[in-house]
Image (tube, rainbow, N blue to C red):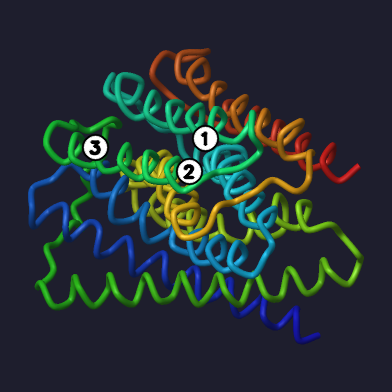
Amino acid sequence: MQNLLFIISGLALLILGGNWLLKSAVALSLKLNIPKIVIGMTVVSFATSAPELIVSIKAALDGFPDLALGNVVGSNIANLGLVLAITVILGGIDVNKSFYKTDWPVMMLASLLFFGFIFFDKELQQYEGIIMVSVLFAFLVYILRFQKPAVVDESPDDDVPLPLYKTVLFLGLGGLGLWGGSELLIEGAVGMASAYGVSERIIGITVVSIGTSVPELAASIIAVIKKEKAISLGNLIGSNIFNLLAVLGITSIITPIKVMDEGLLTNDIFWMLGISLLILPLVFLPNKLRLNWRDGIVLLGVYVTFVYLTLQ
């Protein structure tokens, strides 16, 4: 009963946090005259990746490296197969050239960098973490200086600039809501999963990863409802980049992360690479430079298949 209460409370906090975070992100983009996708890929992505960062660092320090790795790999799969799927089922997204010229290639680069670092020696070492964080820093410098909108935003009339103190307040409340909500959700979900004797990797790749992807889901659904699609797409792509380069990069700098369960290298990591690759053809087929409900069903089908096969 206590675990169920944690899950319900966590979800409520995540929805509130997603709404507050979106308000601050829109206000920042208006105040600084920065494309909304840049805000989505930086401020919103970092805030919604905070649960993964906290969970991964704690798991690695507590001696549960597979939970840290499974959390991030599973979250990246869930962000595209679950969150992006639901987002585009609710409303199609028009995509511009900078998406496949910058954002998607960087996400694939981060994915392949992680794959290369961990596949052969089964460990993320400190110097590899430093390289990953350095790549993230270079990417952030680039998008803040050169990035153009990667999706066509509908510029709703309710984009009203907020006073600076309200922007900071919503940003802080949003981050706290997402963090606190994720903590409650994870504690409740892991408590329920552990009762059934599920392995650490399976818990990380499914329950914990879905739990830490709920902030992205909450922020993206709210963004779609409010027609801020630039933020919803940028948030998801940016979050996957942050999960790999920042979450695993920072965690491995603090303490090396060693693979304990071979399933991560023989199964999970290939699903992550596969669904990341799948996004590009979906952007062009059947409708060029647009993701719609059909693409969402394809992505959701892939995710359901992944979860089903992983739990077998």
| Residue in the foreground of this view, choosing between 86 and 312 | 312
Q: Residue furthest bottom?
A: 2
Residue 155 left/right relative to 202: left
Circle 1 sits in a helix, a strand or a loop, which is it? helix
Crowd around label 3: few <14 · some 14–19 · many ≥20 (10 Å):
few
x and y percentages locating residue 145 in the rendered image: 11, 36
> Mark 2 highlights which residue?
244
Name which quarter of the figure residue 50 lies in.
bottom left
Disc 3 residue type (three-letter): Ala
Q: Quadrant of the C terminus?
A: top right
Which label number is shown at residue 114?
1
**Cα gap from disc 2 to disc 1, whole angstroms:** 7 Å
Tell me which residue sits at (27%, 23%) in the image: 98
x and y percentages locating residue 113 in the rendered image: 47, 30
Name which quarter of the figure residue 115 lies in.
top right
Tell me which residue sits at (14%, 31%) in the image: 146
